[in-house]
Image (cartoon, grey):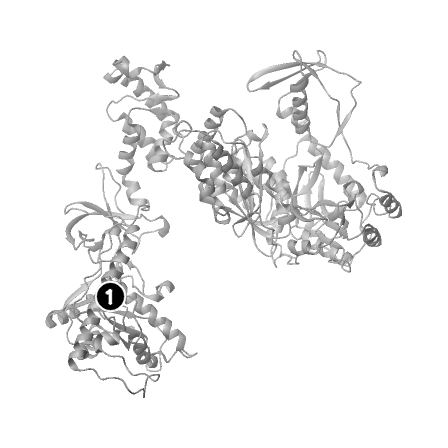
Amino acid sequence: MDGLRANEVILDFLDNTVSFTKNGEPIQWQVFVDTTIPVVQITKSADVCFALACQFGQHYRVANTLFVVQLEEAGTPTPDIEDFSPQMKVLADEFKEVFESIPDGLPPDRAVGHTIPVEPGKLPSFRPLYRLNPAEYEEAKQQIEEYLRKGWIEPSASPYGAPNLFVNKTGGSLRMCVDYRALNKIMIKNRYPLPRIEDLFDRLQGAQWFSALDLAQGYHQLRITKEDVPKTAFRSPFGHFQWRVLSFGLTNAPASFHRAMNDVFREAIGHFVLVYLDDILVYSKTEEEHTQHLKWVLGKLREHKFYARLWKCHFYKRELEYLGHLVGNDGLKVDPKKVVAVQNWPVPQDVGQIRSFLGLANYFRRFLENYSTVVAPLTALTRKGSAWEWTRQCQEAFDKVKTKLTNAPVLVLPNPSKPYEVVTDASTVGIGAVLLQEGRPVAFESRKLSPAEQRYTTSEQELLAVVHALRTWRCYLEGVEFVVTTDHCPNTYFSTQATLTRRQARWAELLSGFTFDIRYRAGSTNMADPLSRQPIGAATRLEETEDKAVVGACFGILAVARVSEVTFSGFLKRIRTGYHVDSWFQNPQNTKGLKYEHELWWREKEIVVPHVGNMRNDIIEEVHSTKYGGHLGIKKTRWALSDVYWWPGLGTEVQQFVSRCDACARNKSDTKKPGGLLQPLEIPDEPWESVSLDFITDLPKTLDGHTAILVFVDRLTKMVHFVATTTDVSAEDTAKLFVANVFRLHGLPHVLVSDRDPRFTSRFWHKVTQTLGTKLKMSSAFHPQMDGQTERTNRTLEQMLRSFIGPTQDNWDDLLPVVEFAVNNSVHEGTHEKPFILNCGRHPTTPSTHGIGGLRVPTAKDFMGKQQEALKSARRWLQLSQQRQKSYADMKRREVSFEVGDKVLLSTKNIRLKIPGARKLFPRWIGPFEVIQRVGVVAYKLKLPKTLQIHNVFHVSLLNKYISEGKYLPPPTIVLGEELFYEVERVLMHRDRQRGCKTRNI
């Protein structure tokens, strides 16, 4: 009857007619009942029955006459014993007690009972009763009376009380269930292990005969422990009751049931019996052996008083389906039903369909050999401007990709020890899902939505995809924790939703039997998206319209659906008036190809907008800048507008508007390549002419009280000096360490290179370098990459210390002299020479070379010549290294420049604004600020307000040109912190631990 109501079918028994509506068109069929047609028993739902009847009518209807097959819903099938093999006939008679109906009363008090441990002191949250329709009301009354008669439930006075609901069974009847979501949430999970599926299959080696047994209402054949019975209480219109046998929907039910099965078949598991929850497989090498094994298994069921459904068992098979695979005498095969969704993908008819197919294939490209070569003919069709031509090469590539997708190594055997992920999606035409483990597909699934399902809400369609996937892959997912990924954000709150629709309530019981989290992933990255949007018909225009509507809905900016009626009506009035003002419409040549209806000019389905005043700009602003527009990008704004409006140059005007949008400029992340090409420092001419220095801080405190290392590096020879010091060393002490370790040994360098550490930015340090006549070069604010060599030296130093440091980590300062020697005596990758040789002109004596005689002592002339030649070679290698690094770096960068007087926005990536709220929602850019000077090639000095107590020279990668038409949002209020200095982001190995990389609070 549900199918008849859903399709609004009217049966007229006086006139013998059937009337209904199809695609908005009323249809009436004349009915002739032929009683000679045999009655066909079915176990399908009324919806399926109606669909079958319609299909029958399409094939046999003549002159609006329908010949109706008599359909009758079947009860439980009764197997014909004659269909069984002779051996099975004997077994069925010998073990007839196993195949009888479950008797009334409680099952035996087994060694395993189901317990329901809950977190101490917690009760499930209250959920109201679900309203029942008349049919469900009567069914609830009957089933409760039946369960009371059997003794499976009893009246309850428990403080627990979940609402009952109904779900449709396969035959179309209703099954009463309980919404245990609240109880499951506070239940302590049972970690009883389920077997690894691949381990089960390993046991089948050499087996030739197979039988599968299905227990009747397996869960109801287990008792719930007496003390936990009150926790199963449920409320209904007829009172408060509680289960005495295991009920569907309890999260630990699979673990309890599997434990009970293991106890029964423990002696034979792995020898000739496999058990996975209620799926029992008996396997043997010979037919005679198989008979003995079946007798043992059936005997155990009889001994423990378990009952099986004879009509759902399979005996003496050479091949059968088990846990989603086909097991047979020729080995293990993947069940073809798992990949039928991909195998049955129709040949694409346009670019949109080929993109959908490639979207699925591309997600798994890492597992497909020579993927790019195989799909080259298909990707060529998606290029802009390419003509659509489906060639033989395209068909071969299409077939080859499908074959690769549906064969190993793409489809992997499931491993229960690894987490599952179910990725689902729904469109207006179908639902799709992919079962993954570690990002690799186990199975694909998709199906078309029925006409009734197409009228579901978006949330219900997305949830239906989840329900369908869990039903399909129950053998993998029941009893384990997994993740469901959906591109529909509201469904992530399903488990905590206060109220459910009637349809959601029917699905709640199924979902409550699984343990999973729902997570959100955008549709553009959802690999199930193509499966739900497969082309399902031949009407190309219809498919294009549906895809366009889906895209528009996903973007959330369809103008007809989002613009308020008042605003839309206002635009229509302005548009109609504008036609009389815009001279463009007075030229018949311009309006050729347009049509005039309802006082509007139309270009196909789009309204043509005249060029009058700011009308076009106002329409763009309404679709882009309002709350329901969402400040989306150029392409998406253009798509939204083109669904409703058109005018010449629409795309250009949208691009100009969005690029000048102040809110977008401030709040969107920059997706372009970083600005500023790499500008390496000039290579020095002489050793120790240019020296870089930096600190490694926050190290373990040594016995001498040291907590930091001051690192000096000669930028030509790469010789280093490591000096132990403290984290709080002052600028004055830093200067003393410089004099003692650099000036004393090598003289005064011309240039010192450092980051913007407060010790180097202090007035004292500037005074020291000024007095000594040394130029101090510092990196621009928040961009210390200029001094890359010190970062690499720091990394090397930390690696060496980790290798030799003691367990207490308090002796690293004792290791610094030998570590310094080791670094200086090793060949540097940049110079292809040892720093010691470049500085001293000779190899140092080490323990391994001490005492080796016969070495020629060079003359002073030879000594100087060789040293100078080594320095020239080092400079050449450094130049090549810099060129190579610049080439690689510039591939990921773009050239950007500003003029003095330009307005720019400053990135807040390294600036912590002291404004209320979460940093994730702070503006990405602040400003605009005026450029007052270009510093070097890739840095600029900005005119900052006095409240910003930071260095005002910034690398170009942190700046964006500000373009606005004078309408912009005010910048956030900036509150000063207690400290008015800023600490630059350091270039250190330990910055990954977020030490020494503090961003300034301003």
Seen in the picture, residue 824 relative to 391 is either above or below; the reply is below
Closer to us: 933 or 881? 881
On the rendered image, what quadrant is the C terminus found in?
bottom left
**Image position, residue 87 (x, y; %):** 86, 45
Q: Which residue is mark 1?
A: 757
Task: Give 407 or 358, whichever is nearer the viewer.
Answer: 407
Residue 393 position, x and y percent, is 48, 35
Q: Position of residue 90 (x, y in %)?
A: 88, 45
Determine if residue 223 is in view.
yes
- The answer to whether any part of residue 947 appears in the image is no
Quick one: SS at disc 1? Answer: loop
**Residue 776: which quarter of the image?**
bottom left
Residue 921: x and y, percent? 36, 48
* Front residue of this view, candidates 439 and 967: 439
Tell me the amino acid under the disc marked 1: Asp
Position of the N terminus by quadrant: top right
- Residue at the image position 35 percent from the left and 73 percent from the top: 699
Q: Above or below — where is 760 with respect to 929?
A: below
In this picture, residue 121 sits left or right of residue 566: right
How many numbered circles does the render carry?
1
Please indicate whether residue 935 sits to the left or right of residue 979 in the image: left
In this rendering, position of residue 656 left or right of residue 135: left
- The residue under the point 39% across, 25% down is 565
Structural crowding at the residue carrying mark 1, measured as other residues with C-alpha within 10 Å and reported as few (<14), some (14–19) or many (≥20): some
